[in-house]
Amino acid sequence: MMWNLLKDIWFLFGRLFPFPTKPGLRRVGNPGRSSPVLVTANFELTVRTVMETLERDGIDAWLLVAPTKGVNVWCAGGAGDFTADTVVSILKTSGIENLVDHRRLILPQLSASGVNIWSLKERTEWKPRFGPAHVKDLSAYLRNGKSRTEREHRHLKFNLKDRFVMGTNLGFNVALLLILPLLLASVWLPGLLWGTLALLFVFSVLCSVLAFWLPGKPGVQKGLSLGILGAAVFVVFTEVTGPPDPWHLIGWTGWIMVISAFVGYDMPSWSPLWRQDATELILGVKNTHVEILPEKCIGCHLCDIVCPADLFAYDSAAKKYAVVNLDACQACGACIENCPTEAIVNNFRSGVCSCPTCAVINGVGALTRKGSERKPSEEVAATVP
């Protein structure tokens, strides 16, 4: 219990860093030969959360913990560490095929940016499907017996608790990123180090918690909105506590704005909703482009199934999909990775996210990796998962 508590404290601040648990097969409850087979990443918090959720809800299941270098599902998918190869490896080494009579495999939806489901079907005897985006909806998905997740369970949310936790992680990691240059600068500017570290952490938490209420587009605009508020509080406090030194007041007011803008620039990388490039983060101008070529679309539904942002809509008359909500696109690449006919035109396979955190984890570079050969259109249409 104490060890789990210490790990929970670490995860409140250090989720950027890998925290692996041993890959392999886990029994949840008392699974039998007809029990569902699930796959997840070997990020310790993810495995523990999935197992605790299923145990709490009384679900017996087999859980395959794939070797994703101790990184969570979505980051591992984007970084190329949670792929069809990864899933094939755990299927072959776990011995699961000898423990169940079926070949149904349930993958986390957020692995779709790295796992090409057609490649996985071709290389194994299993029938993979993507489950819900959130682990809290997993039990409902397993119980309803449907082959596809409900639409509301496929879309990412960013509730207050998640925003607070992501804010603490953002604050901790930007502090680590900047502590060395701040130490050097504090030699000439005493008081800069601790004042800046405190501001970085407080603004990181506030920028995440207040993300939906701050004016402006996600990125620098929201950061500056928070900075204006913070600078106003600082000016009032300085005036109340005594006659301010003009240069001290001007210097710290400007520095508060710079820190807040930087935090605002980085915050979307910690959010499940706003993965963006530099143009969007700085200017608030949408630069991400996604388009479905109607002549190539076969209406297989998979782009809509794997999209966590409700980007697509189905035209029942044309039996095609189209992009209807481009502003919501996170550039995760799941639709592109899994489109069987390469019908999706985009401008971000070489990397759309240019915020500091994504540069550190190097997740976007893996979006250039395409899956293996696709099935012919007519064959794919008959085998949609």
Image (spheres, rainbow, N blue to C red):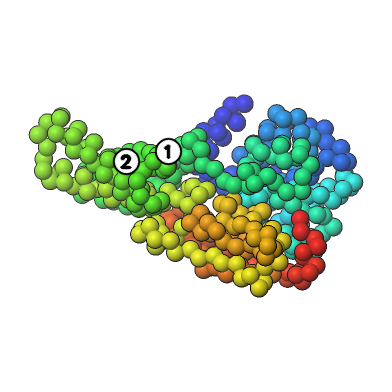
Q: Is residue 167 above or below residue 338?
A: above
Percent of width and height locating residue 239: 14, 34
Q: Which mark, by number, is residue 199?
A: 2
Q: Residues within 10 Å of mark 1 (few under 14, many from 20)?
A: many
In the rendered image, the quadrant that contains the N terminus is top right
Q: Farthest residue toward the front?
A: 317
Residue 94 coordinates in the image, percent (x, y):
80, 48
Along the line of sight, which residue is nearer the eye, 319 or 303? 319
| Quadrant where the image shows the C terminus | bottom right
Q: Is residue 188 left or right of residue 377?
A: left
Position in image of residue 87 (x %, y %): 73, 55
Which amino acid type is shown beneath numbered disc 1? Answer: Val
Residue at the image point whose x is 27% and y is 48% from the top: 257
Which image quadrant for residue 134? top right
Q: Between residue 343 and residue 244, name the one nearer to us.
A: 343
What element does badge 2 sit on? helix
Can you name the residue that lies furthest to the bottom here?
A: 295
First in residue order: circle 1 vs circle 2: 2
Figure quadrant of residue 304 = bottom right
Q: Position of residue 296 (x, y in %)?
A: 67, 72
The residue carrying pointer 2 sits among few (fewer than 14), some (14 to 19) or many (20 or more) residues within 10 Å by Cα, namely some
Numbered badge on residue 209: 1
**Would you say 280 lies left or right of 258 here?**
right
